[in-house]
């Protein structure tokens, strides 16, 4: 074999996009197939949801704004747009009290790649939620680090901070730098959301362990769908301005989810710290890695986001659309959960977002069996993931019974 050692065994298990292709093919042959696979917003008729405000912005962009190369770290206006999106008007306080910078990346995936490649040593262990977007594991294999999991929620359905503290105490014996990925709000795959006090508790962990370094990677890909009052989540994110000097917080921003720009591959990695040298090191390392990995990100994607966030007229129309999308997701969720209750289908604690989870012992087998019922879902290691974002209200109302009957059939 000519392929280098270690690469010959790379095999993507559970490729969500491949399962989606299979579902699309099946639906072409039979329109009653339910495709509840990927995290893309779809209309009631199954077509891709495209924001009108995005379409309007694109119509008015110049050729340079669409196609030219730009600064590989992102233009100053793009940075401003990302920081405003995440923190709103709080950004001025943050800039007074901390050092903050934002780097454009090809989607949230690029942001994760960038932060993990510069903040994880080979052989180190990262802490991940026990119900997770399993792509995090792929980065570990690619970059040579290990992972362990913390419990996302306890028996009361609340963020399990005690479990996380125990895990950190265990990990401290092995390594100094503690890196944790937190996917919040609207966690993929559960739809679980943390609370204000959970963020306070995270910061407290770093404060009470001054001899360790803490890297908080906040994967906030779905934050726009948490609450139509954006200030609630922005104020929560702003809490990270209180991290101590032994910690750095990263925010992974996804243009795919926020603005429906999935295929354009645009996002950002934002770093926040109290240490001037740390932010400088972040910028330099990111600049270097960016050039080595993908050179430049999507100019078109950046231009769309800049205009949507910084132009009042576009922003207002986008904000109205987001409200409609949140309502659309809620309608589907209410129907799904009501019917789930009726048929005794257990779901994990869901609050908001694109996905709902059904715990089961053999998710892969169940997902395959469900193909016979013309249903395509994503199995994770621990559960079946229903993508509310892609199904109609009618499909949301019939799915629980189909899943429950399948689980019964398989004695799961
Ligand atoms: N983080 C989570 C939790 C996701 O579900 C996804 C995509 O599905 C991403 C990050 C990355 O998305 P993208 O690279 O398209 O921005």
Image (cartoon, rainbow, N blue to C red):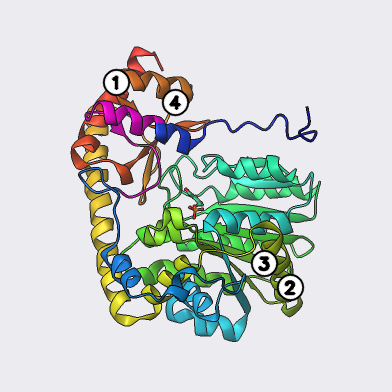
Q: Earlier in the sequence, mark 1 or mark 2?
A: 2
Separation (CA) of disc 1 from disc 4: 18 Å
Q: Which mark is residue 248?
A: 3
Residue 52 % position (x, y)? 26, 64
Q: Quadrant of residue 113?
A: bottom right
Separation (CA) of disc 1 from disc 2: 53 Å
Task: Write down the residue under mark 2.
Answer: 278
Residue at screen point 57% across, 51% down? 161
Q: Earlier in the sequence, mark 2 or mark 3?
A: 3
Separation (CA) of disc 1 from disc 3: 47 Å
Q: Which mark is residue 195?
A: none
Q: Is mark 2 within 8 Å of ligand 1?
A: no
Q: Secondary structure at mark 1?
A: helix
Residue 153 % position (x, y)? 49, 44
Residue at screen point 66% across, 59% down? 115
The foreground one among 262 and 34 is 262
Magenta-drawn stretch contains 37? yes
Furthest residue toward front: 63
Q: Secondary structure at mark 4?
A: loop
């Amino acid at each position: 074999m000519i392929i280098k050692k270690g690469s010959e065994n790379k095999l993507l298990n559970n490729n969500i996009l491949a399962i989606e292709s299979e579902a699309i093919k099946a639906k072409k042959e039979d329109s009653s197939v339910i495709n509840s696979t990927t995290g893309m917003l779809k209309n009631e008729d199954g077509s891709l949801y495209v924001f009108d405000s995005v379409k309007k912005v694109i119509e008015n962009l110049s050729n340079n704004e669409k196609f030219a190369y730009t600064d590989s770290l992102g233009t100053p206006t793009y940075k401003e747009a990302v920081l405003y999106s995440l923190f709103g008007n709080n950004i001025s306080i943050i800039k007074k009290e901390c050092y903050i910078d934002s780097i454009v990346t090809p989607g949230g995936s690029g942001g994760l790649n960038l932060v993990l490649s510069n903040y994880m040593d080979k052989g180190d262990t990262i802490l991940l939620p026990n119900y997770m977007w399993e792509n995090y594991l792929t980065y570990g294999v690619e970059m040579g680090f290990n992972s362990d999991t913390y419990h996302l929620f306890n028996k009361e359905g609340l963020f399990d901070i005690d479990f996380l503290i125990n895990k950190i105490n265990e990990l401290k014996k092995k390594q100094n730098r503690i890196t944790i990925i937190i996917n919040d709000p609207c966690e993929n795959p559960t739809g679980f959301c943390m609370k204000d006090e959970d963020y306070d508790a995270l910061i407290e962990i770093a404060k009470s362990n001054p001899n360790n370094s803490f890297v908080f990677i906040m994967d906030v890909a779905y934050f726009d769908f948490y609450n139509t009052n954006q200030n609630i989540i922005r104020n929560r994110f702003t809490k990270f301005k209180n991290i101590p000097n032994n910690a750095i917080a990263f925010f992974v921003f996804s243009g795919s989810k926020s603005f429906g720009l999935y295929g354009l591959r645009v996002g950002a990695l934002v770093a926040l710290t109290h240490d001037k040298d740390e932010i400088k090191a972040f910028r330099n390392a990111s600049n270097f890695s960016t050039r080595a990995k993908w050179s430049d990100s999507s100019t078109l994607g950046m231009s769309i986001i800049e205009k949507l966030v910084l132009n009042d007229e576009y922003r207002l129309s986008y904000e109205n659309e987001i409200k409609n999308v949140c309502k659309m997701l809620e309608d589907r969720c209410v129907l799904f959960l009501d019917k789930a209750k009726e048929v005794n289908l257990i779901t994990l604690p869901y609050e908001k977002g694109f996905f709902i989870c059904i715990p089961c012992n053999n998710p892969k087998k169940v997902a395959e069996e469900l193909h016979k019922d013309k249903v395509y879902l994503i199995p994770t290691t621990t559960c079946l993931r229903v993508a509310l974002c892609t199904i109609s209200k009618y499909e949301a109302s019939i799915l629980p019974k189909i899943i429950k009957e399948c689980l019964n059939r398989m004695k799961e």
